[in-house]
């Protein structure tokens, strides 16, 4: 894997991010991150859903007192964004989940750690101190060999 590189230009979409990342990753790792399971139905559904969202910029509006803080399940966050669980992050960056946790903490956001994390839970938790308002959640998945829940 190439060393982490700074993007040549800021990206404004996932497509642009992928275009910049792929040349720095071995083909097998790029394939893992860009791949999908089964027939790719969920990927297509997600792309379709996100195309329905629009950012509506407000011009000539006073933003000096904007407050993005919110409360999610009793936890106060400085911004209403949670980083979704993503598996195997150290495949594309040496710090993996630790770097993502630091980023979440730096903006007072939250992180959901993947069941398939490449960093120990305790190490990631240390990067999300309570003083930063960073929310700490963990994704729990039933993996093979376990009995399936009955609903």
Image: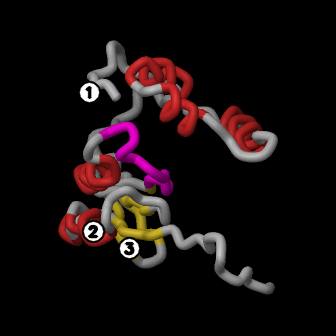
The quadrant holding residue 136 is: bottom left
Q: Residue 66's spot in the image, x, y percent?
A: 34, 47
Q: Classify residue 33 as left or right of residue 111.
A: right
Q: Is residue 91 magenta?
A: yes
Relative depth, front residue between 23 and 129: 23
Q: Quadrant of the N terminus?
A: top left
Q: Is residue 45 above or below residue 87?
A: above
Mark 1 vs 3, N-terminal side? 1
In the image, 48: left or right of 68? right
Name the spot of residue 117 as percent of width and height, x first.
Answer: 42, 59
Q: On the image, numbered disc 2 is attached to which residue?
A: 125
Label 2 – label 3 distance at C-alpha: 16 Å
* Nearest-to-viewer mark from 1 and 3: 1
Disc ID at residue 75 = 3
Which one is closest to the eye, mark 2 or mark 1? 1
Query: In the drawing, does residue 129 fall left or right of residue 72?
Result: left
Outermost residue to the top: 8
Q: Secondary structure at mark 2?
A: helix
The answer to whether residue 68 is above or below residue 5 is below
Q: Which residues are magenta?
A: 83-93
Query: Which is closer to the viewer, label 2 or label 3?
Result: 2
Image point 42% across, 27% down: which residue? Answer: 25
- Disc number for residue 3: 1
Residue at 44% in and 27% down: 26
Q: Is residue 130 magenta?
A: no
Label 1: how many Cα within 10 Å (few below 14, some 14–19, many 20+)? few
Question: Majority secondary structure of the magenta segment?
Answer: loop
Q: Which residue lies at the image location 35% right of the left edge and 14% below the top edge?
A: 9
**Among numbered discs 2 and 3, the one appearing first in the sequence:** 3
């Amino acid at each position: 894997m190439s060393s982490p590189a700074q993007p040549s230009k800021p990206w404004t979409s996932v497509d642009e991010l992928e275009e910049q990342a792929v040349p720095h990753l071995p083909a097998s790792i790029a394939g893992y991150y860009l791949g999908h399971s089964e027939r790719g139905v969920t990927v297509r559904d997600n792309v379709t859903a996100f195309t329905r969202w629009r950012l509506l910029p407000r011009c000539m509006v006073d933003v000096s007192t904007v407050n993005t803080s919110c409360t999610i399940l009793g936890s106060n966050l400085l911004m209403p964004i949670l980083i979704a669980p993503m598996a195997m992050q150290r495949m594309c960056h040496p710090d993996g989940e630790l770097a993502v946790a630091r980023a979440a903490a730096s903006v007072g956001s939250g992180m959901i750690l993947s069941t398939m994390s490449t960093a120990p839970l305790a190490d990631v938790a240390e990067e999300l101190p309570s003083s930063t308002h960073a929310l700490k959640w963990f994704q729990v998945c039933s993996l093979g060999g376990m009995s399936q829940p009955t609903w």
